[in-house]
């Protein structure tokens, strides 16, 4: 499989190895179902593929997710019903908004329960089946890739210590942060000036003049412009820092040395 994908899901971490033990259970144990439903979707799915687990049992074990799906669908249904008006101009279903709030609470409660149960299952496995977890061999390709990433990360931290950053790059990152703060303040504090009011039952043709971009008002366009400029400046800074980090790694390797580890970087920055 892809080393990059395995690395992104932290296949060698203790938590993922504990999930590996859980998902390898025969049949449908409660902890397996909790991980399938309440665990992080993408890492769990990738892990199932890496383990070569049979598709049908995994799909069946995921079926309890209907407990989340049903109240979520009801939230949308009640929102729609709450927007309907009778011939007299009054709400056709005045109780719909209340029921929508109830459905939202049930959805949040069910989601929290499954997430908590999945975390508890992983924690219990880490504590009670440590020998089995330790016996699982590490993926050597991922281990090597993690070492390379750690080396780059250490070098990146060293070159971005504030005292080592050139004046021009300092200005760029400060300007980037300032613009992002401005963007956030506009969107959070003046949202009514940034976007046109748009309800679930509105249509683009009737309420936005047939042009979906009309939903963004002048202040909203300014906020988006600030966000774009901030991102470009951040990308510029990160590109410079990555280039300097690579140069540092090459220089240290030529001298038979390694980049500073995280603790050394922090000590160096505090000096």
Image (spheres, rainbow, N blue to C red):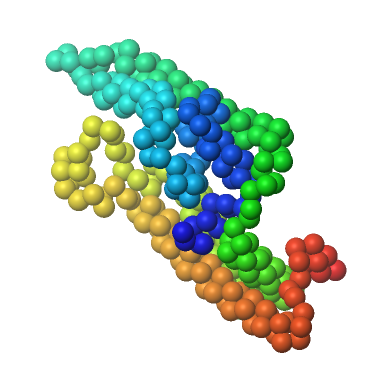
Residue at left offset 28%, top offset 23%: 77
Which residue is at the front of the view, 242 or 41?
Answer: 41
Residue 166 pos. (x, y %): 66, 79
Q: Is residue 114 left or right of residue 12?
A: left
In the displayed image of the protein, which residue is found farthest to the right? Answer: 271
Looking at the image, how many numbered discs can be counted on the residues?
A: 0
Q: Is residue 27 left or right of residue 166?
A: left
Residue 193: image x %, image y %? 38, 46
* Residue at x 59% of width, y 39% of height: 21
Q: Position of residue 208 (x, y in %)?
A: 21, 45
Q: Is residue 83 above or below residue 135?
A: above
The quarter of the picture where residue 157 lies is bottom right
Residue 264 horizontal side relative to residue 22, left or right: right
Quadrant housing the C terminus? bottom right
What residue lies at 16% left-to-right and 40% top-to-bottom?
206
Question: Which of these two is toward me, 245 or 197?
Answer: 245
Q: Is residue 86 above or below residue 152?
A: above
Where on the picture, by quarter, is residue 165?
A: bottom right
Q: As displayed, is residue 264 above or below residue 73?
A: below
Can residue 224 be seen at all in this image of the molecule?
A: yes
| Residue 166 appears in view | no
Report whether 241 appears left or right of 47. right
Image point (33%, 50%), residue name:
217
Question: Residue 254: image x %, image y %?
Answer: 71, 87
């Amino acid at each position: 499989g892809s080393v990059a994908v395995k690395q992104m899901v932290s296949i060698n971490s203790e938590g993922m190895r504990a999930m590996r033990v859980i998902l390898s259970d025969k049949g449908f144990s409660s902890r397996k179902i909790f991980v399938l439903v309440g665990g992080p979707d993408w890492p769990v799915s990738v892990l199932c593929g890496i383990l070569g687990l049979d598709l049908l049992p995994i799909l069946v074990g995921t079926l309890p997710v209907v407990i989340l799906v049903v109240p979520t669908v009801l939230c949308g249904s009640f929102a729609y019903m709450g927007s309907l008006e009778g011939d007299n101009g009054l709400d056709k279903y005045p109780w719909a908004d209340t029921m929508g709030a109830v459905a939202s609470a049930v959805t949040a409660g069910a989601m929290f329960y499954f997430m908590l149960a999945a975390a508890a299952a992983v924690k219990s496995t880490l504590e009670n089946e440590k020998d089995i977890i330790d016996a699982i061999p590490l993926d050597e390709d991922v281990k090597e890739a993690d070492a390379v990433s750690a080396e780059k990360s250490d070098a990146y931290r060293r070159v971005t210590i504030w005292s080592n950053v050139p004046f021009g790059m300092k200005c760029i990152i400060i300007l980037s942060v300032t613009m992002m703060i401005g963007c956030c303040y506009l969107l959070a504090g003046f949202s009514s000036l940034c976007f046109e009011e748009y309800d679930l039952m509105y249509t683009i043709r009737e309420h936005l003049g047939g042009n979906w971009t009309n939903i963004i008002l002048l202040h909203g366009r300014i906020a988006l412009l600030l966000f774009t400029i901030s991102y470009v400046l951040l990308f510029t800074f990160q590109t410079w820092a990555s280039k300097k980090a690579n140069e540092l790694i090459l220089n240290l390797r030529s001298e038979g040395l390694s980049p500073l580890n995280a603790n050394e970087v922090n000590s160096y920055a505090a000096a």
